[in-house]
Image (cartoon, helix red, strand yellow):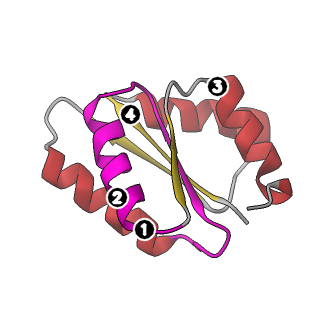
Amino acid sequence: MLSIILTGHGGFASGMEKAMKQILGEQSQFIAIDFPETSSTALLTSQLEEAIAQLDCEDGIVFLTDLLGGTPFRVASTLAMQKPGCEVITGTNLQLATGDGAGARRVKR
């Protein structure tokens, strides 16, 4: 199954996760990581690396980020370039996130 890591500024990821749970229910192979104003690039990098280690990467990982060029996007892109099977999608909204969550079992790489 495709694994998804959702990250973004402030409470973007946890807010999106809450809305997704209301629509889709609990999702396996999904982790949401916020990047609050008090965080750092180093901490976000560490959190994303830990998330990668926790997920089943057999079918790949997609990072869903909020803004092109923002810190969550840049960190996710750097990690994706270092790990085969990782992709980054930016401009994430609830429709995109729930579409990925609902269709993760059908995605073929």
Part of the protein shown in magenta: 55-84
Relative to 76, is 50 above or below?
A: below
Q: Mark 4 to mark 3: distance in Å?
A: 13 Å
Can you say which quadrant of the picture contains the N terminus?
bottom right
> For the point 62% across and 62% down, which residue is it?
29
Q: Position of residue 96 (x, y in %)?
A: 68, 30
How far apart marks 2 and 3 lie (CA) works out to 24 Å
Residue on which the image places disc 2 = 79
* Circle 1 residues within 10 Å: few <14, some 14–19, many ≥20: some
Question: Are there few (<14), some (14-19), or many (20+) residues within 10 Å of tag 2?
Answer: some
Left or right for 28, reference 105: left
Residue 43 in the image, given as x and y percentages of width and height: 18, 53
Judged by depth in the image, the label closer to the viewer, 3 or 1, is 1
Image mark for residue 33: none
Name the residue beneath numbered marker 4. 8
Q: Which mark is residue 83?
A: 1
Question: Which residue does the image show at 32% across and 29% down from the upper left?
Answer: 9
Is residue 76 on the magenta stretch?
yes
